[in-house]
Image (spheres, helix red, strand yellow):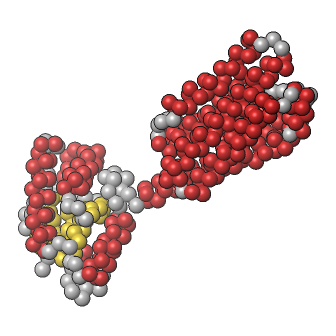
Amino acid sequence: MPIEAIAGLQLALYGLGWALAAVYLAEERAALSHWAAYALLQAASAWLAAEPMAQGLRPPMASLVLSVLGFVAATRGIDLFIRGRPLLDRWLLPLTALTLLPIVLSAVWVDDLALRRRWQETPYAFGLGVLLLSSVVLLWRPLRRRAGTLAALAVLLPSALTGLTGLASGVMHLVLGAPALGQVQQAARVPQVLASLVASAVFNFGYLFLLLGRLISQWRASARQDHLTGLPNRRATEDGLAVDWARHQRQMSGLSLALIDVDHFKSINDRHGHARGDEVLVFVARHLQSHIRVGETLGRWGGEEFLLSMPGSSLAVAQQACDRLREGLRQAALQTLGEPLTVSIGVAQARPGEASTQALIDRADQAMYRAKAEGRDRVVMAD
């Protein structure tokens, strides 16, 4: 089996892997589809070139065209992965057309086989070199900013080396005669394919590194986010409160805490169903989040309860802020939901000598239950 066919088989396996990933990862499908197209186009290019190269001939025109399109797909896929949209198209598409146009036209207008090969391979080499090197320059900063230096190097260094190789090949096509060029190309055949095997492996594992890094970041974020309201979940809320507590302990800057409970929430579920209950929780979360002050943090504590941490707030300031939230929520609910909606709020302030946040939470919780017992739709301060 020609060595080019082995390289094509490797690339085809990469392409099938990316295609399968695109099926299951809908949010990354655009980039993954481009990477699958890159690997499959390069595989087809290698297969078309395998038999002629084994016989000492040059790759056919279709092989060159598919190779260029494959690298274009790879570059566009990185752009989509980083930015979510192909911002490089204004540069990428004209450059691709300038590279492919002489390759295709030479097959129609140039009858001499040796001259046709030179007209095809020279623009291919120069076009590929310029395309890859310019993509490295344009993608380096956004990729490093998004994925880190190591990932950017893993993805873009093979592109840079392949681009430099393309430029060097283009220069040789211009300065060497046909016999000398043929000897150089035949001698470089096996090393060039081996380098391609290594480069494609680094290419694809670099893409895999990018994808895994993003998936891990998304998993970590979702593990700390309430799936319904988008607020920090209880674990993340406890961690944020611990940070506020530590700052208060160091600086004695004050820390107030509010537990907010939606009144008659069970009745909403019983009368209108759980879908309506979810709608109410999302509405409450968005309203509160959009009306808390800078530096305050809101999280879903559980069920229909929300916890609001107010670092640096005195008890009087915290009471005024919570009364404003309660009243604003009631009025907004009438306008948006078309029915009354109230909350009961218990507020507590950290005391000197308190050992942990648990005592603070317990006092806010007791105040919230007193607000419920006293008629709801009110703010009650802890003793």
Report the front residue among 28 and 69.
69
Is 376 on the left or on the right of 194, as rendered?
A: left
Residue drawn at the location 35% of the way across and 61% of the way down: 233
Residue drawn at the location 62% of the way across and 48% of the way down: 155
Is 239 on the left or on the right of 178, as rendered?
A: left
Is 306 on the left or on the right of 157, as rendered?
A: left
Residue drawn at the location 54% of the way across and 42% of the way down: 138
Quarter-of-image position of residue 346: bottom left
Percent coordinates x, y for residue 315 in the rendering: 13, 74
Quarter-of-image position of residue 314: bottom left
Report the front residue among 157 and 20.
157
Q: Is residue 128 visible?
A: yes
Looking at the rendered structure, the number of numbered marks drawn on it comes to 0
Percent coordinates x, y for residue 116 in the rendering: 79, 18
Q: Is residue 311 above or below residue 377?
A: below
Quadrant where the image shows the C terminus: bottom left
Q: Is residue 257 above or below residue 184?
A: below
Quadrant where the image shows the N terminus: top right
Percent coordinates x, y for residue 335 in the rendering: 12, 42
Is 243 on the left or on the right of 1, as rendered?
A: left
Residue drawn at the location 56% of the way across and 26% of the way down: 94
Q: Residue furthest bottom?
A: 353
Percent coordinates x, y for residue 256 in the rendering: 20, 73
Q: Is residue 340 visible?
A: no
Q: Residue furthest front?
A: 175
Q: Is residue 267 above or below residue 94?
A: below
Report the front residue among 130 and 288.
130
